[in-house]
Image: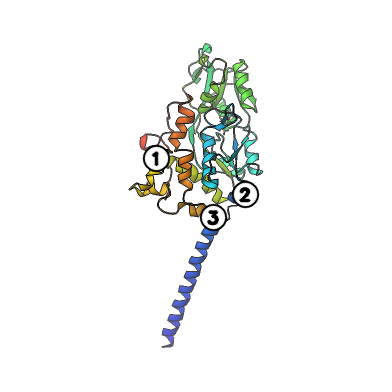
Amino acid sequence: MKGKIMLKTLKTLVYMLTSIALLVSFETGAMAAKKSKTLKKTQKMGYVRCGVSQGLPGFSNADAAGNWKGVDVDVCRAVAAATLGDSGKVKFYPLSAKERFTALTSGEIDVLSRNTTWTLSRDADIGLTFVGVNFYDGQGFMVRKSSGITSTSQFKSGISACTNIGTTTELNMRDFFNSKGIKYEPVAFEKADEVVAAYDAGRCDTYTTDKSGLAAQRTKLSKPGDHIVLPETISKEPLGPVVRQGDPVWEDIVRWSLNVMIEAEEYGITSANADSMKSSENPAIKRLVGAEGELGAAFGLDNDWSLRIIKQVGNYGESYKRNIADTGILPDRGPNQLWTKGGILYVPPAR
Ligand SMILES: N[C@@H](CCC(=O)N[C@@H](CS)C(=O)NCC(=O)O)C(=O)O
């Protein structure tokens, strides 16, 4: 009898403890969302503080009226649509490659979306967290057609190479030339326009950067047709948005804002048809347009956060077309095609 009572008491105790543990875990889940300091601050300020380049067509570039455009700009616009309800509520901070990480770690900006390569040392060392890849790229070389060079295999000692300070480009270039025993002269500047001007003026034999950068910057040369981009790609440059370490919910918001754009394309959801997709039979589509599930809750957002991204900014394909393909920068998507269409764009499911 005594043993039975003890067993019952023990069972009640276990039940109580389990309930408390469950309550605590739900509570911390909900509180985590509410506790994103960056989200709170962003909502209080009324705009997302977004670090961009000082002008890279197709990626982040201000037009004559001062409107920022590009696939990197669209990541910040997606975050603004998700967190503030309006993709227009973004303040852009043009940064050189050298300035970009300090701007983020010092708290001047909250998202860095600036053709930035995800590398181990950047991810691990300086208080930064990369949240994904919005453009798979690699480093290349541009030369004057008149040089007769058609391949990097023709490069010889004495070659001078223009590039930007504070980039992976500088490091890859060093590795590349050193490994081939080619003595080279680096001609490096902080501002990208200085690099372009120096190359255009003939101060260096080659201009090296990400191939997307070469395609974009080529449009600024006085005679773009006089130059060619060599076929070789000497590095991996996965470019993507970065946040400051220490606010995991903000990190998730930025990561999933990008993921939503990519997954929306996968499911054929566009800015034009997003509303009508609410009545789709496909639960994955319904979740993305906020008609099923409560995906926003974990971030402390309402359930239309992802619908707003798709309606206001568009899916990844729409953004690519508008900014990179239709502008003639890189009409072919190459690896930046969905995995379902032979590319490597593959994001975890929004569920
Ligand atoms: N992806 C490389 C290179 C990034 C980079 O800064 N590239 C230059 C050349 S394309 C650039 O963005 N210029 C535009 C600017 O500085 O505004 C990195 O993350 O280090």
Classify mark 1: helix, strand or loop: loop
Q: In screen coordinates, is 57 left or right of 185?
A: left
Query: Picture quarter containing residue 32?
Result: bottom right
The tag on residue 33 is 3
User: Counting residues from the N terminus, which is met first, the one under dot 2 or under dot 3?
Assistant: 3
Q: Is residue 242 above or below residue 224?
A: below
For residue 273, the mark is: 1
When asked about the image quadrant of residue 63, the answer is top right
Left or right: 62 as drawn, with respect to 305: right
How far apart marks 3 and 1 lie (CA) works out to 30 Å
User: Which residue shows up at 55% across the image and 17% down it?
Assistant: 156
Residue 340: where, in percent of width, then height?
Answer: 36, 38
Badge 3 marks a residue whose secondary structure is helix
Q: CA distance from mark 1 to mark 2?
A: 32 Å
Instruction: Characterize the local packing of mark 1: few (<14), some (14-19) or many (20 or more) Cα atoms within 10 angstroms.
Output: few
- Whether residue 230 is visible here, answered yes or no, is yes
Q: Earlier in the sequence, mark 3 or mark 1?
A: 3
Residue that mark 2 sits on: 44
**CA distance separating discs 2 and 3:** 16 Å
